[in-house]
Image (cartoon, helix red, strand yellow):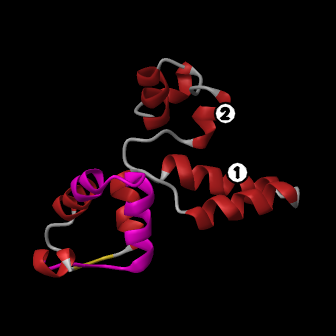
C-alpha cells in the first residue's frame, strides 16, 4: 500500500530483501525503502536485483548456488559466484583481491581492485 502511494511497484523478492535488511524495524524498513526509491527515481517497477544492488546485500539464491558449488567441488563455478558477489556491485572489491591481495605493482595501473584493497586496509 505504501509503495502504491509512492507510485512504485517492488516485486515480492525485493520486499523480502527489504524486510530482512531492516531486521524487524519498521523505521529501518521505511528508511531502506526511501533509499531504494531514491536510487531508482525513474523506475516505476523495482526488481529484487535493484533492491539487492542498492542495499548491498546478496541474493540468497547466489549464496545457495555458491554453497552447492563448494560442496560439489566445482572451484571455477564457486569463484565465478564469489566474483559476482564481490566485484559486480558498485564500490566493492573483486574476489581476486579479497582472496589474493592487490595485484603486483606492474599490473595495477587503474585497477579498481587494487584501490579497493588499499582503501580497506588489507
Residue 111: assigned label: none
Task: Name the residue rendered at 18%, 74% in the picture.
Answer: 2
Of helix, strand and loop, which one carries label 1? helix
Q: Is residue 76 left or right of residue 39?
A: right
- Most common secondary structure along the magenta stretch: helix
For residue 26, side relative to residue 78 (left or right): left
Q: Residues within 10 Å of mark 1 (few under 14, many from 20)?
A: some
* Structural distance between the alpha carbons of marks 2 and 1: 10 Å
On the image, which quarter does residue 66 sit in?
bottom right
Looking at the figure, which quarter contains the C terminus? top right
Name the quadrant containing residue 9: bottom left
Name the residue nearer the viewer: 14 or 118. 14
Specify the segment rendered in magenta.
Answer: 7-31
Percent position of residue 82, x then y: 63, 50
List x then y, in percent, for residue 5. Answer: 11, 78
Q: What residue appears at the point 59 percent right and 22 percent down from the top-left corner?
A: 104
Looking at the image, residue 10 sits to the left or right of residue 31; the answer is right
Q: Is residue 106 above or below residue 12?
A: above
Question: How many marks do you count on the picture?
Answer: 2
Determine which of the numbered discs, if any, sits on residue 99 in the image. 2
Residue 88: image location, x then y, percent = 47, 53
Please provide percent x and percent y for residue 117.
Answer: 49, 26
Q: Which residue is mark 1?
A: 79
Which sits in the foreground, 84 or 37? 37
Dot placed on the residue nearer the N-terminal end, 2 or 1: 1
Residue plotted at (60% across, 33% down): 98
Amino acid at each position: 500500500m505504501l509503495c502504491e502511494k509512492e507510485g512504485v511497484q517492488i516485486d515480492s523478492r525485493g520486499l523480502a530483501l527489504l524486510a530482512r535488511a531492516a531486521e524487524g524495524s519498521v523505521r529501518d524498513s521505511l528508511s531502506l525503502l526511501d533509499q531504494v526509491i531514491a536510487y531508482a527515481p525513474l523506475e516505476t517497477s523495482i526488481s529484487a536485483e535493484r533492491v539487492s544492488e542498492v542495499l548491498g546485500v546478496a541474493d540468497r539464491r547466489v549464496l545457495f548456488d555458491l554453497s552447492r558449488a563448494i560442496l560439489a567441488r566445482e572451484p571455477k563455478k564457486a569463484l565465478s559466484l564469489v566474483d559476482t558477489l564481490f566485484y559486480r556491485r558498485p564500490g566493492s572489491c573483486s574476489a581476486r583481491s579479497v582472496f589474493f591481495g592487490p595485484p603486483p605493482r606492474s599490473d595495477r595501473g587503474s585497477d579498481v581492485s587494487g584501490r579497493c584493497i588499499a582503501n580497506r586496509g588489507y
